């Protein structure tokens, strides 16, 4: 079961607007991909007026390439608020 963990930085001053974008994006993705679970996390500490956020995506059958491509396309709406690149990490369960 393949899962995605995507992290990036957001200016603290822009956090409320960025959160609205991510929540709308994740709602749309859940509607498009039945069974998709999406969450938004952040590190508790801020540094230099920045927050580190992480989006997580899981699916009962694993996050396939089509879903990953859709996530990347949907995330373009967040681009103006990013403080650097989005880093995508893929993990699978230990067997």
Image (cartoon, rainbow, N blue to C red):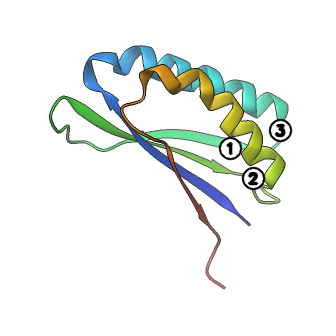
Regarding residue 82, the answer to whether it shows in the image is: yes
Q: Is residue 26 visible?
A: no
Q: Nearer the viewer, residue 78 or 19?
A: 78
Q: Is residue 5 above or below residue 51?
A: below
User: Is residue 51 or residue 59 the one in the foreground?
Assistant: 51
Query: At x 70% / y 32%, what residue is drawn?
Result: 73
Q: Is residue 2 left or right of residue 16?
A: right
Whole-percent x, y for residue 6 in the image: 52, 48
Residue 26, percent across and down? Answer: 64, 30
Q: CA distance from mark 1 to mark 2?
A: 6 Å
**Mark 2 — residue?**
59
Q: Which residue is mark 1?
A: 37
Q: Give the position of the C terminus as an image quadrant.
A: bottom right
Q: Which badge, 1 or 2, comes first in the chain's sequence?
A: 1
Percent x, y for residue 24?
Answer: 62, 20
Q: What residue do we see at 42% from left, 41% from top?
A: 8
Q: In this image, 27 relative to 64: left or right?
A: left
Instruction: Tell me whether circle 1 and circle 2 mark residues in contact (CB < 8 Å).
Output: yes
CA–CA distance in space, label 3 to label 1: 9 Å
- SS class, disc 1: strand
Q: Is residue 74 left or right of residue 77?
A: right
Above-or-below relation of 94 to 49: below
Looking at the rendered structure, the secondary structure element under dot 2 is: loop
């Amino acid at each position: 079961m393949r899962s995605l963990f995507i992290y990036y930085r957001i200016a603290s001053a822009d956090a409320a607007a960025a959160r609205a974008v991510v929540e709308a994006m994740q709602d749309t993705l859940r509607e498009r991909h039945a069974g998709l679970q999406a969450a938004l996390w952040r590190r508790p500490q801020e540094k230099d007026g920045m927050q580190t956020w992480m989006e997580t995506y899981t699916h009962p059958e694993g996050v396939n390439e089509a879903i990953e491509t859709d996530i990347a396309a949907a995330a373009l709406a967040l681009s103006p608020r990013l403080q650097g690149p989005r880093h995508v990490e893929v993990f699978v369960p230990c067997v």
